[in-house]
Image: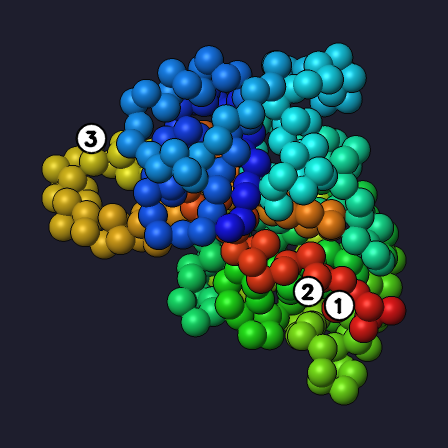
Amino acid sequence: MTSIALDVMGSDGGPEPLVEGAARLSREDVDVQVLLVGDEARIAEALKKQKYDPSRLAVVHARGQVPMNMKPAEALDTIEDCSVLRAARLVQDGDAQAIVSAGNTGGLILASARTFQRLPGISRCALAAVYPTELRHGPRDDPFALMLDVGATLNCTAEDLRGFAVMGSAYSRIISDIGRPRVALLSNGSEASKGTPNIVEAHAALAAFSAGDGSNALDFAGNVEGLDIPRGTVDVVVCEGFVGNVVLKMLEGVSEVVSDLARDAYARRFLWRLGLTMLSQGIRQIRTKTDWKQYGGAPVLGFDQVVIKAHGRSNARAIRNALKVAAKAVDRDLSGEIKRTMASFE
């Protein structure tokens, strides 16, 4: 049975949605045990409202959490037994095989960096995230592709970008079941000479590796531009964390603006209201297919342990799915897959 340490403190909604998500998973036919890490009294109170399998859930008390308005290093130094550090140590000690948290992103990454080792050949870790696309991906026709880094490493070397490409490809194979994901660098043109010196250097290394004997699982598609991101022309987009974070926030903002415009149109004109009503079924289908909650959390790639960052606004369904993603990454040996690919690269 796979054990997952779930940091239940620090999310926008408090412990309740995380405890509910774990309780839901405990009632399913899956070999996963969840260790609920946090304030024992608050977890016990939340569990009273849930139906759950007690053999699949356990409570691990931790004092305090990393506040959103506090610097992660300061918080971890001050609150030595905070929930995210306690969860990471459970993984380090072998009591769990993965950590999931919906709390402070910087706190999770720093706690992992202080507790786990980086994989051989990986110079920097990356936070990956899925984003909606026009084209479908993989055997399940997912309307999402993967982007990394989106905030863990702001400025990247060519070596960093190369490692991100390997990790993104491995994650896409393991989680999305894509046999040979198409991986691309985000640049200001499709030509190999376009982009910063680091992008050009990474392009040359990835192109040479992908053009080898074909035994490796990395399919490098070259450079893509900003317009290719929503189209979904590749399965994995690689970029610096600064750029990736800006792009991801822009995509979220555009979707919110479109929703606001549709709501305003519905309120202002009868014909618009009639048209939106007629399209309501299609709009609901689009919303369902592009709902990030059904895809679980965002992986922090590069450590020798599985680390999943759930959104701070995650509901019970999103937490349940984040736990399932973590268990899948453990069962299919995501870290080992990255190590093997990096070894062949070297």
3 and 1 marks in contact (CB < 8 Å): no
Residue under label 2: 337
Local SS, label 2: helix
2 or 3: mark nearer the eye: 2
Local SS, label 3: helix
Give the residue at x 80% y 45%: 117
**Tally of marks:** 3
- Three-letter residue code for mark 2: Glu
2 and 3 marks in contact (CB < 8 Å): no
Left of 190 or right of it: where is 291?
left
Residue under label 3: 267
6, above or below 202, in the image: above
Q: Rate crowding at label 1 as few (under 14), some (14 to 19) or many (20 or more) other CA atoms within 10 Å.
A: some
Residue under label 1: 340
Q: Is residue 98 visible?
A: yes
- x and y percentages locating residue 244 in the rendered image: 65, 46
Give the residue at x 59% y 54%: 330
Left of 242 or right of it: where is 171?
left
Among the two numbered marks 2 and 3 on one chain, the one whose residue lies closer to the N terminus: 3
Tell which of 98 and 181 is nearer to you.
98
Q: Rate crowding at label 3 as few (under 14), some (14 to 19) or many (20 or more) other CA atoms within 10 Å.
A: few
Q: In which quadrant of the rendered image does the C terminus lie?
A: bottom right
261, above or below 76, in the image: below
Q: Is residue 71 visible?
A: no
- x and y percentages locating residue 38 in the rendered image: 55, 21
Give the residue at x 82% y 77%: 208
- Three-letter residue code for mark 3: Ala
Local SS, label 1: helix
- x and y percentages locating residue 281 in the rendered image: 18, 51
Among the two numbered marks 3 and 1 on one chain, the one whose residue lies closer to the N terminus: 3
Cα–Cα span, label 3 and label 1: 56 Å
